[in-house]
Amino acid sequence: MAFQATKREWSELYTFFRLLADGKVAHGTPQAKRNEDNVWPIAMIQREEHNGTRRYYIEGETIRMETELKEKVQSGAPVLTQSLPREDFAEVARLVLEAIKSSADDEVTSPDGVEEFLDAAAIFDLEAKTEDRTDLSIAFWHPDAPLAGFSVRSRLSTMNPLLDGGRTANLKFEQTGIKFATPTVNKINALPESPTEVVDRMLMIERLGGVLKYADVADRVFRSNLLMMDLHFPRLLAEMVRTMHIEGISRVSELTKLMRETNPLKIKEELIEKHGFYEFKMKQFLMTLVLGMRPAKIYNGTDSAVEGLLLVDGSGEVLCYHKSQKEVFEEFLFLNSRFEKGSVEKDKYGFLEKENGVYYFKLNAKIGLVKR
């Protein structure tokens, strides 16, 4: 019986099947192209299901699967083992890719034969069930090699953000310049919902003589996390988000170039030109996001279980980025990420709000990968 799943769910499964079928993965360039000179062989892929761990060993033309059921691990029960032809994974990967590409909707119906294969491969969860945010863990070169955890992003579907907005990622701007009467504030906040409602309110504040001046990070934990980057980083991030709304520029690389020119932190020209201060800080921040920083979780500089990113491009090619190749990974993130606009209603930003007699205007920080 056919079932439906989102393109993002199918993309994660596609990545898993494609890697097992190929038995290797090429690293990507900063421009998200395949690097033929840097290909890593895959020996085993580990995936978490709701009822236990699955390990898929590549052994010639066969995939040997081992299953550890959670309820039986402590009892010392034997690991369940079965084998499937490797060509089956290649065929299912092809079917899934075709289904994703041919569907105009986000919900994609399972192709004929795929559900039966999922049952045979003991795959019941389309997205891996992990607490450490890894989607797949891979042993390269040898099955007993240390596992490297990866998150999957696909340009064939919507992508989870690198920095998920949410209320904890709000930045506060104090409204200065002129003191607005309550009716004026109500008029500003009453501007109708639209894709430009936030910038419309910002421009209206400006037209009426108001000035939005960076004040603070709304959430205490996120503030501390940003300060770990640099004591001035919250101000830089706030200025980039503000500029994104005002200028309509979203790409991180383009906004960073603008920061070089406007120099919001008022640092020395030598630091900007010779040391590439603004580029360095943004690359460091993006890499930190990929490797584990979250707005609402205390960050102490320790990387999470995620060591890299697997990117599915528009043609279905799977590219690998790993923290051991830091410069390439950072440059890829820098060139291929953008600021995004979160839900105004859900994330509670974009309005003048009074706190202790002072009006503040919140903006939301959200960063994701570009689709192309």
Image (cartoon, rainbow, N blue to C red):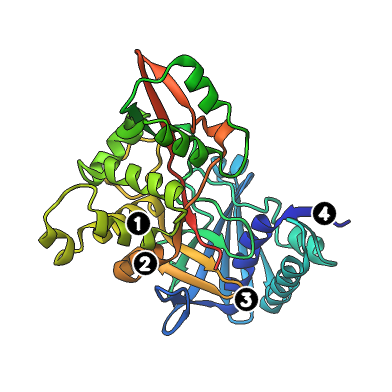
Q: How far apart are labels 3 and 2 at the CA level?
A: 21 Å
Q: Which residue is mark 2?
A: 329
Q: Which of these two is toward me, 215 or 23?
A: 215
| Amino acid beneath label 3 | Ser
SS under mark 3: loop
Residues at marks 4 and 3, CA–CA distance in whole angstroms: 24 Å
State whether residue 307 is above or below residue 229. Answer: below
Does 284 appear above or below 30? above
Q: Position of residue 251 (x, y in %)?
A: 43, 59
Asked if the residues shown at circle 1 and circle 2 are in contact, with their CB atoms under 8 angstroms apart, the answer is: yes
Query: What residue sits 39% from the left and 58% below the top?
Result: 252
Q: Amino acid at mark 4?
A: Phe
Q: Which residue is mark 4?
A: 3
Q: Nearer the viewer, mark 4 or mark 3?
A: 3
Amino acid under disc 1: Met
Horizontal arrangement in the rendering, residue 282 relative to residue 7 (left or right): left
